[in-house]
Image (tube, helix red, strand yellow):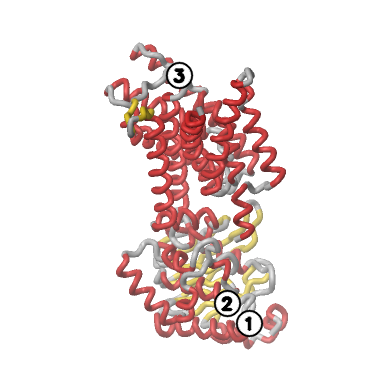
Amino acid sequence: MGLLVVENLSVGYEKMEIVSGVNFTVEKEEIFVIVGPNGSGKSTLLKGLFGLVRIFGGRVILGGRDITHLPPYKRSLLGLSYLPQLGNTFESLTVWENLVLAAHDLPRDEFTGRLENVLEILPDIKRFMNRKVHTLSGGERQMLALAMGLLRNPFLLMMDEPTAALSPKLASRVFQQVLELRKNHGLSILLVEQNALKALEIGDKALLLVSGQPKFYGPAQDLLKSEELARLYLGV
Amino acid sequence: MLEEIFLNGLIYSNLLALLSIGLSLTMLTSKVSNFAQGDFAVVGIYAAYTTSLLTRVTPYMLLPIAFLVGAAVAAGVYLLVFDKLRGKANLVTLMIVSIAIDIILRASTQIYADLLQSSLHVFGRGFIFNDIMYNVAGTRVSGVLIYSTVTTIFLLALLYVLLFKTKLGIAMRASIENPSLAETLGINVRKVFTISWGLSGGLAAVAGVFLPFRMPVNPDTGFAILLSIFAAATVGGMTSLAGSVLGAYILGFSETVFTFLLSSIGLSTAYRPALAFTAIILTLLVAPGGLSSLWNRKG
C-alpha cells in the first residue's frame, strides 16, 4: 500500500465543490507533482488533504490509517507537513520563535539536534535568527517556512507553490532542495507548482487538474511527453 | 485628600487592568467583544463569598479558588458556545451571542444568590467583605490596596512570562495571528483558545474578589462595571494586551478624580459613566485603534 492513498476525493468550500473525484497514490521517497492551469483547484486539493477545507466525499489514507476526518493538528502529529503558499510564517514572531513553534512537541535535546540538521540544509537562516519575520524578504520567509516544515521531521512534505514570487535563481535552489530532501533524508514530497515544466522534470509521478477534474495521472515524464496536454493546459 | 484619591484610583485601576486584559484576550482569540466579561468577575465574587462563609477564611486567601472557578466558567462558555461558532459567525453575531451569555450568567447568579440566602441564611445580595487594615511605616493601609496591587503586578508579570517565555505563550500568539497555520504545525488551536478564555475568566474572577471590599455587590455588579472595562480596553487598544493595561490605569484614575470633582461641587456621582463614554468617543475619533496603535505605527 502507498504512503498516501487518495480515493475518489472531492473537496471545496462551504456549499461549493471545487475538486471532484480525485484518485492517486504517493509512494515512499517519491516526488509527486500536482500541476494545472490557474484556478484548477490544486491548492484547494492540498488543503483538503490536510483537513483545512470541507471534504465532500472520498477518503485520505496515510500510512494505512484513514485520516479523512482528522483535525489538521492531528495530521501534523502523524508526520504530515504542509507548507502553504501564502501566510506560511508568523509575522509577529521572531524567526527563532517560529522555529520553536514548529517543533513545539519535541523535547529540548531532540529540538537542538533537528535544528542543527535543518540549519545544515538551510544555513542562511542563522543570519536572521533573531529578526521579526515581517522584516524578512520573500525568499527569506520561504526559506524559514521550509525550515519549519523540515523541523517537524515529516515523512510526507506537502508544498504549495514554494517558488511563487521567488527570483529564477532562488526558485532553482528550491527545486534543488526538494531533490536533496528526497535523496538525503528519504522524504516523500507532494508538490503543487505553477512552474510545470521544472516541476515535472524533477517529479516521479504527476496529476494534472483542470477545472477541478483530474485529466491525467501517471509518470511525470509521460505528461511532459504528451504534447497535447502539455500545450493545452500547461503552456509547455 | 490627594493621597486618598490616588489610593482609590490605584485600587480601581488594578481591577480594571485585570478585567480589560481579559477582554482583550477574548477579543484577540475569538474576535468576541465579550459582554459577559463582568459576569466572570461576579462568578469570582460568589465563589470567594461562598467559600469564605463555609471556611471562615478571609477572601484574600481564596483568590486562587476564585481564579479556578472563573477560569472554568469562561473555558466552559468558550467550548460550549464560541468554539462552535469559530469561522462561522460574523462579529455582530458573536457580540449578540455574548450579550445572551451575559443574560444567562446574570440570571444563573440571581438563582445562586437566592439559594445561598435560603440555605446558609446569609445575604445573597448587597453584601460586602470586611477589610483588614495593616500598619505600614506608621500609616494604616487597607488590605485591598496592598493585595490588589501585589496581585495585579504578580498576575501581569506571570502573563508576560507565559506569553513571551514559554512554548504555550508562543503557541497562543501564533494561534491568534494565524490559527490555520498553527493547526498545520500540530498545535491544537481549540485547546489554546480554551486556555486563553480560561485565563481571561480567571483574571476577571480575581478582580471581582476585590470589589466587595469597596462596595456592596450583587449579581448585576458585573454589568454595572462593563462600560468601564470596554472603555479601558478601547482607550488602550482593544487588541493590545499592553494597551489594555495602560488604558485601565488612565481610565481608572480619571474616573476616580472625576467622581471626586462631581461630589465636591455637590453633583451626583451617577454622572460617572459619562466619563467612560466620553473616553470611548474621543479615542475612536482621535485614534480608532486606541493608544497602542500610536506606538505600533511608530514601530
Amino acid on which the number 2 mark rests in the picture: Gly
Q: Earlier in the sequence, mark 1 or mark 2?
A: 2
Instruction: Give neighbour class at mark 1: few <14, some 14-19, many 20+ (Cα, 10 Å).
Output: few
- Whether pointer 1 and pointer 2 mark residues with C-beta atoms closer than 8 Å, the reply is yes
Name the residue that disc number 3 marks: B111
The chain containing the residue under callout 1 comes to A
The answer to whether one can see residue B84 in this image is: no
Quadrant holding the C terminus of chain A: bottom right
Residue B271 on image: x %, y %: 64, 23
Q: Is residue B172 left or right of residue B294?
A: left
Q: Could you tell me which secondary element the residue under label 3 belongs to?
A: helix
Task: Name the residue at 45% across, 45% down.
Answer: B194
Name the residue that disc number 2 marks: A139
Q: Are marks 1 and 2 on the same chain?
A: yes
Asked which quadrant contains residue B297, the reply is bottom right
The chain containing the residue under callout 2 comes to A
For the residues labelled 1 and 3, the Cα–Cα distance comes to 67 Å
Instruction: Give neighbour class at mark 3: few <14, some 14-19, many 20+ (Cα, 10 Å).
Output: some
Instruction: Give neighbour class at mark 2: few <14, some 14-19, many 20+ (Cα, 10 Å).
Output: some
Asked which quadrant contains residue B188, the reply is bottom left
Name the residue that disc number 1 marks: A167
Q: Could you tell me which secondary element the residue under label 2 belongs to?
A: helix
For the residues labelled 2 and 3, the Cα–Cα distance comes to 60 Å
Residue A32 on image: x %, y %: 52, 77
Amino acid on which the number 3 mark rests in the picture: Ile
Q: Is residue B99 left or right of residue B8?
A: right
Task: Name the residue at 41% across, 38% down.
Answer: B149
